[in-house]
Amino acid sequence: MMAMVVAIKRHKRSFSGVLLFDKSKGFSSNQALQIVKRLYRAEKTGHTGTLDPLASGLLPLMFGEATKFAADLIDASKTYRTTIRLGYASSTGDAEGELTQVSTRALESITDEEVKQVCAQFVGEIQQIPPMFSALKKDGKPLYEYAREGIELDRAARTILIHQLDVIKLEHNDSDGERSYTIELDVNCSKGTYVRTLGEDIAKALGTAGYLTELRRTAIGDLKVERAYTLDALKVLGESENPFEALDAVLFPVDALLGSLGKVELNNEFARRFSHGQRLPLELADAKPGRVRVYGEAPAQDVSNMAFKGEPQFMGTGILETDGKGALLRPDRLIQVNL
């Protein structure tokens, strides 16, 4: 008699919140998302701020209603800790590529003061040519596919902003007769910045070549990697007596993604009207116009969804228009709430 195999489909959970995930090296951002999605049995997920497999650090993962605000972090400034090795060029700008030793300058002649002066020249608005090994597209095809075929294309320089560039550590190493010079940096930069290219350009300004040996993202806007959880830490929570309760407890509320926006609180009646898409006249003479977080009064009953814990209750974002006398609030992006 043939054995009957019955496949049991695991029930997916519908919830909202933000997980600050500390991605390790070796897998892509999407692979990280799928692993965590299975761990949480989440119905709806997303991530923002892609990290390459060779990069580690902060990767915000969004569940449920939080996915509506993924784009807000794309525009936020990013902070990285990176290490540049001088004297070698890489075909990809990082340790994954083919390395070529470059002897245009004796590395021992590079002084710490010179490195700091060169790095200072890259602070502010600068022009950067995107690398061939990037996801930018030409005629619908990613540049890295051309690069893998040995094709080099012209790329237009783009304006980026380096908010801060701090030299953390400089090291001369001499092991097994092979000399190397590394520069460890903290970089706070605008969206669209390629840190690999920044490392190559700093090395070029020092009269040599260089590539990244380490890249770790430590912050996106106000979100810090110190508050993030590794996969191993999440697995421990997932093996606890009440795994989903433990896993949900480390989630941040949806509005954690919107800390840079102003805040408007509404009474029950205005909150109800706002949730129905109505524009609201408000007496906010000194309010700053623009996009804002909007909150209504929390419902009397307990709401277990992570998106809506606490008072007041986050409802979404709105656009505030002012004329110096009053203000008009119109809905922008709303989430599902109980009013």
Image (cartoon, rainbow, N blue to C red):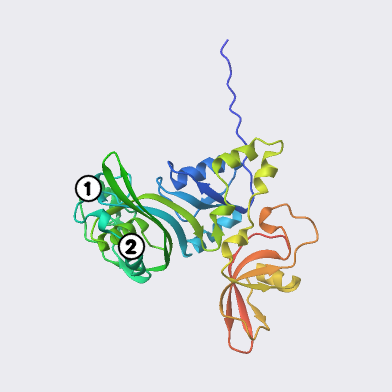
Q: Quadrant of residue 191?
A: bottom left
Q: Quadrant of residue 224?
A: bottom right
Q: Which residue is under mark 2? A: 115
The image position of residue 11, as x and y in percent, is 63, 38
Q: Residues within 10 Å of mark 1 (few under 14, many from 20)?
A: few
Nearer to us of marks 2 and 1 is: 2
Q: Quadrant of the N terminus?
A: top right
The image position of residue 192, as x and y in percent, is 38, 62
Q: Quadrant of the C terminus?
A: bottom right
Q: Judge left or right: residue 140 versus residue 56.
A: left
Amino acid at the residue labelled 1? Gln
In what element is the residue under mark 1?
strand
Q: Which residue appears at 70% of the width and 70% of the height?
A: 271
In the rendered image, the vertical position of residue 257 relative to residue 285, given as above or below: above
Tell me, for residue 260, which label it has, or none: none
Q: Which residue is under mark 1? A: 101
Viewer-nearest residue: 27 or 314: 27
Q: Judge left or right: residue 89 versus residue 18.
A: left
In the rendered image, the vertical position of residue 294 relative to residue 177, given as above or below: below
Amino acid at the residue labelled 2? Val
The reply to whether the C-beta atoms of the residues labelled 2 and 1 are less than 8 Å apart is: no
Comes first in the chain, label 2 or label 1: 1
